Each structure stands twice: as structure tokens, then as C-alpha cells.
Image (cartoon, rainbow, N blue to C red):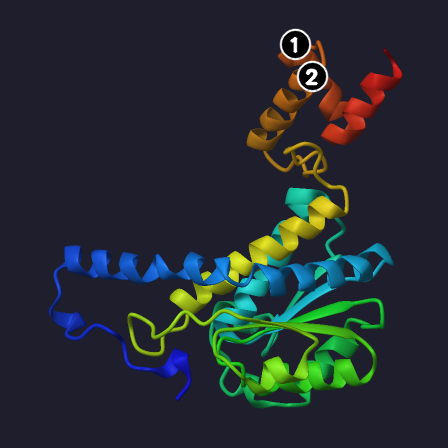
Amino acid sequence: MKSTEQSSNYEGLDKMSTADLLSSINQEDKKVPEVISKLLGPIELLIEAAFVCMKMGGRLIYMGSGTSGRLGIVDASECPPTFGVDPGRVVGLIAGGKEAVYKAVEYAEDSFEQGWLDLEEIGIDEKDFVIGIAASGTTPYVLGAMDEARSRGIKTACITCNYDTPLAAKVEFPVEVVVGPEFVTGSTRMKAGTAQKLVLNMISTSLMIKLGHVIGNKMVDMQLSNKKLVDRGSRMIMEKTSLDYDSAKELLLRYGSVREALTAYAGGN
């Protein structure tokens, strides 16, 4: 039986107090980073390979179904505002399309052909790097896409939460984050989802840093999409210059990013 389908280590959840529910869920969640700490080697190999592709102009593409697909979309959608990259630089695909982001689309994940068709629709090529996300490691939508992509010389990876899965066998860079039975049996939106999210954080953040979108520890290319981010950017500029807050803010708004504002400041001084 798949680890993700094994019976919960806890019985009588419906009889537990709120305090016991919270304590038990928290105990299970603590296991996740411990498992990931033992997988830094495989995650590093994945990131280095993806970096080569992205340096050549390729895209990072996530694909999955259900929770796994939604997590990929969340990570992809955060890259443009956080790092200032083009929205097409990191892409998230989900079985069932946009409708499936908000509600389950019946049987969408069961097609071996649709995953590759979705990749073709976004014009995939040999420079791209594709990561299949599937807690079970058996999702047909992802399996078919990885199989076809690899046969065409496209670099492939996966994040799964079971050992020795068909998905891991199909890709070049497998990451198997096996966190054990879920608190609610089979509910992979819990520990498995947390594990996938943490690994996705590592992948996208490391790649964006390596691609030059962070200087020091600052998001110098972030989009100025709200007052909080304008304030953050203004203070970044203050830290690096002799400007007061109002002058830093004026410079930021004139040039549109912390990077461009600092470059302009350095050129004028």
C-alpha cells in the first residue's frame, strides 16, 4: 500500500477535543521538515539542472492534479510579484484547467494524453524544465506528460510522497518526500501538501536567487503592486543610500523597481 494511503496513526478523531486535534496535527506536521532535511542532495541536483535550462531562456513548468496542481500554480503565480520575472517564466498547469483550481474536476487526472497536450499548448521545447507534482506518484495526467517530455529530450523531475513510484522512475530528477500516513487517512492536502510546498519554496527561491533577482537578502525586482511593497522598497533604498524616506520613495516610483532606482542613484553620484 502507498504510504499516503495508509491508515492514520490516530484513532477516534471525531471524539477528540479541539486541543487534542491541534496537538496531534502539529505533531504530524513536525515530521515534514525532518524528512526534507535528508533530501537536500536530490533537491540540489534538480535545482542545478533547472538553472542550466533557465539560463538558456527555458521555463520552469509545474504540473499536477488536485492539491498538487494547485500548489504548483500558487508557487508559479508568486514568482512575478516577488522576483519581477515575466509571468511566463514559471508556469503552473493543473489537470482540468483553470476550473480545477477552484473545484475538483471529475476524472481530469485520469488521462495519460492530456498532460502532454497541455504542455504542447504552451509551446514546450527542449530548453524548458518540467516538474511533475503528485503525492501518489501514479497520476496518469502527470505520468503521460513526463513520459512524452523525456522522450523528446526535455528535462524532467518530480516531487512525490511515496517510494519507488512509476513517476519517479520516469523522470531524471526524482524527489521522494515520504512523510507517512496522513492525520486524516488519505488526505494528502495535509502532510504531503506541506512537504510539496516546502520543496517548491526551495526550488523557486533558489532558482530566482541564482538568476540574479535577489541582491544580498532583498527582493530588488519585486513588483510595486501595493502600498506595503512600495514602503518596503523605499526602505531598501534608504538602507543603500543617503536618501531620506520621501526621496527614496520618489526615486523608487520614478524607476519602478529597487534595482533600477539604485542603479540610477549610483549613476548620479
For the N terminus, the quadrant is: bottom left
Residue 36 place in picture, x, y as percent: 49, 61
Dot 2 corresponds to which residue?
A: 248
Badge 2 element: helix
- For the point 49% across and 75% down, which residue is it? 135
Residue 95 place in picture, x, y as percent: 59, 78
Residues packed near mark 1 inside 10 Å, few (<14), some (14 to 19) or many (20 plus) = few
Image-quadrant location for residue 230: top right
Determine whether 104 is above or below 238 in the image: below
Hey, what amino acid is under mark 1? Answer: Asp
Q: Nearer the viewer, residue 197 or 180?
A: 180
Residue 236 place in picture, x, y as percent: 65, 24
The reply to whether discs 2 and 1 touch (Cβ–Cβ < 8 Å) is yes
Q: Nearer the viewer, residue 253 or 81?
A: 81
Badge 1 element: loop
The residues tagged by marks 2 and 1 sit, at their Cα atoms, a distance apart of 6 Å
Q: How many labels does the image show?
A: 2
Determine which of the numbered discs, if any, sits on residue 244 in the image. Answer: 1
Determine whether 32 is above or below 149 in the image: above
Q: Nearer the viewer, residue 23 or 110?
A: 23
- For the point 59% across and 54% down, which residue is it? 202
Image-quadrant location for residue 90: bottom right
- For the point 63% across and 84% down, which residue is it? 169
Determine which of the numbered discs, if any, sits on residue 137 in the image. Answer: none
Hey, what amino acid is under mark 2? Answer: Ala
For the C terminus, the quadrant is: top right
Residues packed near mark 2 inside 10 Å, few (<14), some (14 to 19) or many (20 plus) = many
